[in-house]
Image (spheres, helix red, strand yellow):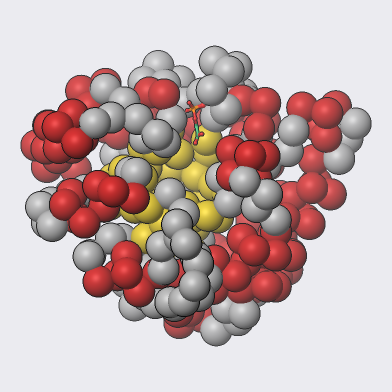
Amino acid sequence: MRQKLIIGNWKMHKTAHAARMDFLAFAERTKALAGRVDVGYAVPALYVAELAARRTQVGVYAQNAHWAAQGAFTGEIAAPMLSDVAARGSLVAHSERRQMNGETDATAGKRVGALLRTGLEAVLCVGETLAQRETGALKEVLTRQLSEALGASGAAHATDVLGSDPMRPLLSIAYEPVWAIGTGKAATPVEAQEAHAFVRAELGRILGQSMAAKIRILYGGSVTTTNAAGFLQCPDVDGALVGGACLDPVGFSQLCEAGLPGR
Ligand code: PGA
């Protein structure tokens, strides 16, 4: 049984005071979920250390991490730095970074590899644009994104990908159709399940079936408190990556309850 993983992506939102207050409010409201649903926030880099130091059950993720352990990379953050301040992991290649910051499948893979080798979780984001879906290129796009990134990651060993905690593999995939991000136009649960089943089959081809069965595949793109349960009931949807609907800690804590087993 894959335990559900629900991560809120703050993107470039919240001042320091709001970040602290909202994080603590969410941590308080989700205490009862500990051990049953994995919850977390991907926060602006500036807040990672302080929020992770609170040592709550809420995982603190960065929104990006560089592949080098250190060096002349102005403005970047290395995986060992995140580990040092007790971050749980990082998003990798969110579509906004692919579109606005020149992220490629090859650099995504290098970031994934660096995180896994540091013992941190990597949440690799993949997904098609509307034009790609409309021209029937969905599977081709997912195959390319997964093969190239996981190939470039150099993470061939199960210990790299799965870590030591059977409930919490180090690698997860976030399937986020670009046309559904921030648009209010989510995929349907049927569309999500189809894409997730395909992603799992591809993971099986690339990493082997037993690893693919353990890796969590999150759906992202206009997930709300209202539609979350519909996605989380699909057999291959193991969680959610939530943007807009995570900004309010009360609403987001309610959304996370949809990840409880048997819901
Ligand atoms: P959204 O964002 O929930 O606001 O669509 C999702 C994401 O970008 O991860």
Which quarter of the image is occupied by the C terminus? top left
Instruction: Work out whether 152 lies above or below 38.
Output: below
Q: Quadrant of residue 175?
A: top right
The quarter holding residue 202 reads: bottom right
Residue 176, horizontal then vertical, whole percent: 60, 38
Q: Is residue 24 above or below residue 250?
A: below
Residue 139 in percent (x, y) is at 80, 46
Question: 212 or 50, which lies in front?
Answer: 50
Residue drawn at x 78%, y 57% is 144
Seen from the viewer's position, the closer of residues 124 and 95 is 95
The answer to whether residue 220 is left or right of residue 151 is left
User: Residue 130, relative to residue 154: is it above or below?
Assistant: above
Left or right relative to 197: residue 27: left
Q: Residue at x 67, y 26 (%)?
A: 179
Total tally of numbered discs in the picture: 0
Q: Quadrant of the N terminus?
A: bottom left
Residue 143 horizontal/vertical position (percent): 77, 55
The answer to whether residue 1 of the structure is visible from this angle is no
At a point 35% along the width and 74% down the height, the residue shown is 80
Question: Which residue is at a point 21% across and 56% down the rendered structure image?
Answer: 49
193 horizontally vs 46: left or right: right
Residue 67 in view here: yes
Seen in the picture, residue 255 relative to 68 is either above or below; the reply is above
